[in-house]
């Protein structure tokens, strides 16, 4: 470890080396003499050197092992940025393309000081947008396009592929843009992206408390009973195409269905539903499947 005295002479004295001090012996030194002292675990044949702090990092090795000129003691690491970045005078790193772009990107505005625009855009042709910078220029594209690998040309960006959820139902790509459309029976909302049903019917929620099935409008204002007298219904499904309601009653051991108006009630499965916890309706394949847990 290093010990530094609280006292120091105003003028550096002559360099002093104290030899013949063994590692287990601490020399008697006055505070004005010693400012920098190194204690090591040494063999009896080794010595301990004492120097004044004025000679630390003075370009000359004053300690026997040169530790007073070690890089870790004398050199301060300088902050750096990656090759594609510019270092602000305030210390942060920004993208090189932001230098001299007319916007304050460094905290101290050093990226916009002393800019000399090279006007390289007059000689280099970008397909759409060219921006001069302090170090050169760069090309960019209008919204709806993306830069090609050559760094100059632009190609259409297919938003329907790059952002699948950009439209709630149907997405059609066009050059530089895209258009959202709705399936038959739906109309497009004012945001131009989402669709809602165009039937005039208020949306509703079908749910069960195991003993009956109820219909609740999403605004909570209307509540009606669809079916009652059930035993232990644990799952519901609704076929919008045929307007049929399916349910799994594990208490009665059945899978049943009926039309939403209450007609044509029938039993589909009356055995082998032990352990069933869910119901799945395939709208395309037109079949219903019971779900059992894997145990």
Image: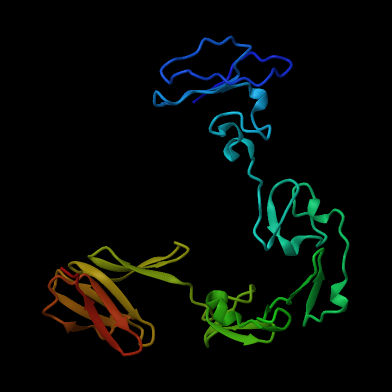
Residue 18 visible in the current orientation: yes
Report x, y in % for residue 56: 64, 29
Residue at the farthest bottom position? 285
* Residue at (85, 73) in percent of width and height: 120
| Vertical side of 195 occupied by 30: above or below | above
Report x, y in % for residue 176: 69, 83
| Vertical side of 242 occupied by 189: above or below | above
Determine the image quadrant of residue 74. Answer: top right
Q: What colour scheme has been applied to the protein in the rendered image?
A: rainbow
* Residue at (19, 66) in percent of width and height: 232
Observer-nearest residue: 218 or 50?
A: 50
Report x, y in % for residue 89: 76, 47
Determine the image quadrant of residue 294. Answer: bottom left
| Vertical side of 264 occupied by 82: above or below | above
Identify the image quadrant of the C terminus. Answer: bottom left
Report x, y in % for residue 263: 28, 84
Horizontally, is 88 left or right of 29 in the view? right
Observer-nearest residue: 112 or 272?
A: 112
């Amino acid at each position: 470890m290093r010990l530094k005295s609280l006292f120091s002479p105003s003028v550096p004295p002559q360099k002093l080396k104290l030899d013949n001090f063994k590692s287990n012996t601490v020399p008697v030194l006055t505070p004005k003499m010693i400012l920098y002292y190194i204690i090591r675990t040494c063999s009896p044949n080794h010595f301990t050197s004492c120097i004044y702090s004025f000679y630390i990092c003075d370009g000359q090795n004053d300690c026997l092992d040169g530790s007073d000129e070690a890089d870790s003691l004398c050199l301060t690491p300088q902050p750096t940025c990656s090759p594609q970045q510019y270092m602000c005078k305030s210390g942060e790193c920004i993208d090189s393309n932001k230098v001299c772009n007319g916007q304050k990107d460094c905290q101290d505005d050093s990226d916009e000081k002393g800019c000399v625009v090279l006007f390289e855009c007059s000689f280099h042709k970008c397909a759409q947008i060219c921006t001069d910078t302090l170090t050169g220029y760069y090309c960019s594209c209008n919204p709806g396009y993306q830069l090609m690998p050559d760094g100059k040309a632009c190609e259409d960006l297919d938003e329907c592929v790059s952002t699948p959820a950009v439209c709630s139902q149907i997405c059609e790509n066009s050059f530089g843009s895209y258009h959202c459309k709705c399936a038959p029976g739906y109309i497009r909302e004012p945001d131009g992206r989402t669709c809602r049903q165009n039937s005039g019917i208020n949306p509703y929620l079908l749910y069960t408390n195991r003993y009956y099935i109820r219909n609740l409008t999403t605004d909570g204002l209307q509540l009606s009973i669809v079916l009652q007298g059930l035993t232990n219904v644990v799952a519901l499904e609704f076929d919008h195409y045929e307007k049929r309601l399916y349910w799994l009653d594990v208490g009665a051991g059945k899978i049943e269905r009926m039309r939403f108006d209450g007609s044509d009630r029938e039993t589909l499965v009356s055995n082998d539903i032990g352990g069933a916890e869910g119901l799945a309706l395939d709208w395309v394949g037109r079949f219903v499947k019971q779900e059992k847990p894997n145990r």
